[in-house]
Amino acid sequence: MKPDRYKMYNTNPFKLGLFGANCSSGRAINTLPERWLADWDSCETMAKLADDIGFDFILPIGRWKGYGGPTNFQGSTFETVTWATGLLAHTKRITVFGTVHAPLFNPMVAAKQMVTADQVGRGRFALNIVVGWNEPEFQMSGIRQRDHGDKYDYCEEWITAIKRMWSEDEAFDFHGKFLEMNGVVSEPKPHGRTAPLIMNAGQSPVGKSFALRNCNGFFTSFKEHDVKKSAEFVASYKAEARAIGREIDVFTQGHVVCRPTRKEAEDYFRYFTTEAVDFGAVEESLRLKGFTRANTPDYDERRRMVPLMNIGYPIVGSPDDVAEKLGRIHGAGIDGIGFSLVNYVTELPFLGQELMPRLEKMGMRAPAA
C-alpha cells in the first residue's frame, strides 16, 4: 500500500475535491436545465474525470430527504458508503469519502461497510462523520435526535468502537454510556491495516473538540473579507491538536464558476443565484430552521441569502481569478477545498485544461504525472 493515506497518497500542497455530487442539484438550489441530476452514469463519469485530471478527493453529502420546490432540491440522493464503493471500483487514485450519520448507522454494520469500501479502493476510502440536524430525516428513520452534547458523546463512543474493530484481532466487549457491545469481532481489517482518513465539520465548540480528538481533518468556513482571521484560526486549531499529540489538516468548502472571462462567470453566477433559484426549496429550508414570514422581520433578505450561503465561499471568475482566489485560501494555511459545480461533468474538463496548470505554476499542485 502507498504510504500516508491521510495525505491522500500525493504531495500536492493544496488538495482539491468535489463536494455534494451524490445529490440532485448538488449544492446549488437552481432550476437550470443543465442542473446536476446525480444519476449513476453521471456520477461515474464525474469520478473518472476527476481522477484523470488529478483531483484528490470526492466528498458527498449525507442527505435522506429533499427540500421540495419545483426541483425537490437534493431529493434524489445516493447513500454515501455504497456510492463511494462503486466510485472506488471505477477509479485508480482519488480518495472517496462516505458521509455517515453516526446515530443512524449501527457501528458494527458501519465498520464492516467501510472496510468493504476501503478494500475495493485499496485504501482510498475516507470517512466524514456527521451527527445530523434535519428533524424530518430523523423522523423518517424512527430515531430520536439527542441533545447537542449527547450527539457528540455518542459519536465518540461510535467511532471509538469502530476503530477498535478496525485494529483489534481478539474479541472485545465495549461498555459505554450509549453502546453496550459484547464479544465484538470484525474481519477483514481496512486495507493495509490502517484506519481510513476521518473528517468532521462540527462548528460548535463541542464539535471542534471532537474533531481534535478523533479526526485527521476538519472542515471550516473561509472568509474572504478577513483572510487574517481565517489564518489565525487555522494556526490556533493546528496548535491545539499538536498540544495533545495529534496532527490535523484543515479544509474548507465553496462553489466554483470558472469561465473563459470574468464577465461570463459573474453573469452565470448571478443568474443561478437569483432568477434561476428554486425558491420553493429555499422556503422549505428556512421553515426547517424555524424561520417564517410571521416570526422573521428580515425574511425576504434571508430568503435571498440562502442560495448564496448554501454553496459556501464563491470562487467565481476566469481561470486566473479562480487560481488567485484558491491561492488566498492556501495562503491562510488551509490544506484543501471541496467545491461544488452546477454540472460536474460539463465543467470539469475546462478546469483540467485551464485551472490545474495555473495551480501547478503557483506551487499549489505537484507537476502532473
Image (cartoon, rainbow, N blue to C red):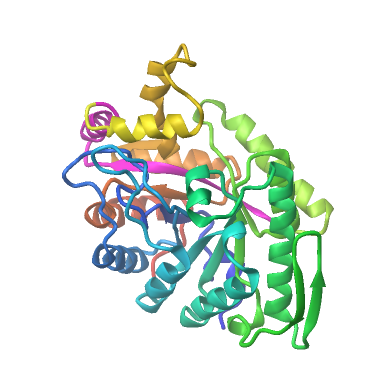
Q: Which residues are magenta?
A: 248-274
Query: In the shown orientation, is residue 158 left or right of residue 363?
Result: right
Compare residues 96 and 50 and report the one nearer the observer. Answer: 96
Q: Is residue 273 magenta?
A: yes
Instruction: State the residue lying farthest toward the left.
Output: 33
Residue at image point 38% right, 62% down: 78
Instruction: State the residue lying farthest toward the top.
Output: 297
Residue at image point 36% right, 68% down: 51
Q: Position of residue 129 (x, y in %)?
A: 59, 57
Q: Position of residue 49 (x, y in %)?
A: 30, 65
Q: Position of residue 350 (x, y in %)?
A: 25, 53
Q: Is residue 241 magenta?
A: no
Residue 353, by quadrant, is bottom left
Q: Indicate the quadrant containing the N terminus: top left, top right, bottom left or bottom right.
A: bottom right
Q: Could one spot residue 102 in this view of the protein?
A: yes
Query: In the shown orientation, is residue 194 left or right of residue 367?
Result: right
Q: Position of residue 201 (x, y in %)?
A: 59, 48
Q: Is residue 290 above or below residue 354?
A: above
Residue at image point 51% right, 56% down: 141
Q: Indicate the quadrant containing the C terminus: top left, top right, bottom left or bottom right.
A: bottom left
Compare residues 249 and 279 and report the one nearer the observer. Answer: 279
Residue at image point 58% right, 42% down: 220
Q: Is residue 60 above or below residue 92?
A: above
